[in-house]
Image: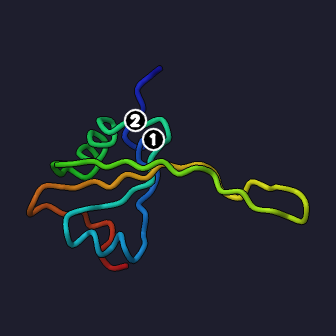
């Protein structure tokens, strides 16, 4: 399988109240590709944002299903979330001004 570019690994930042609070502790939350591993996520963040990544936590989320009458309908796709801790004194400006 070929290498993914850093922009294929990182899908989008997750902008929630909890993720904005985590930014004060140098932790940032991103939605990432389902195929990406921790090493690829670390390299992508370091390449895109020019920071040193200390730690990466990854969580997989199963698809959520709902109902429409008697039919079971798929509501949301499966996705993967990464919590990235950057080095002390460094920060990402993705949540500034939100």
Circle 1 Cα neighbour tier, 10 Å, few/some/many (<14 / 14–19 / ≥20): few
Residue positioned 45% across, 54% down in the render:
31
Residue positioned 43% across, 73% down in the render:
16
Q: Name the residue at the front extreme.
A: 70
Q: Which residue is mark 1?
A: 8
Decide which of 61, 12 is in the foreground and name it.
61
Q: For residue 2, what is the image quadrant?
A: top left
Number of numbered callouts drawn: 2
Residue positioned 27% across, 42% down in the render:
42
On screen, residue 51 versus residue 5, left or right, reads left
Q: Are marks 2 and 1 in contact (CB under 8 Å)?
A: yes
On screen, residue 55 versus residue 61, left or right, reads left
Residue positioned 12% across, 55% down in the render:
87
Q: Name the residue at the top extreme.
A: 1
Above or below 24: residue 41: above
**Marks 2/1: CA–CA distance:** 5 Å
Circle 2 Cα neighbour tier, 10 Å, few/some/many (<14 / 14–19 / ≥20): few
The x and y percentages for residue 63 are 63, 51
Point out the image quarter for the C terminus. Answer: bottom left
Q: Name the residue at the right extreme.
A: 70
The x and y percentages for residue 82 are 37, 51
The x and y percentages for residue 81 are 43, 53
On screen, residue 47 versus residue 11, left or right, reads left
As drawn, the label of residue 5 is 2
The x and y percentages for residue 50 are 20, 50
């Amino acid at each position: 399988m070929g290498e993914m570019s850093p922009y294929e690994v990182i899908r989008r930042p997750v902008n929630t109240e909890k993720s904005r609070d985590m930014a004060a502790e140098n932790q940032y939350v991103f939605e990432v590709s389902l195929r990406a591993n921790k090493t690829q996520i670390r390299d992508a963040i370091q390449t895109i944002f020019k920071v040193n990544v200390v730690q990466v936590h990854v969580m997989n989320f199963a698809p959520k299903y709902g109902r429409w009458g008697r039919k079971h309908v798929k509501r949301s796709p499966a996705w993967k979330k990464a919590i990235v801790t950057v080095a002390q004194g460094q920060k990402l400006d993705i949540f500034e001004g939100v």
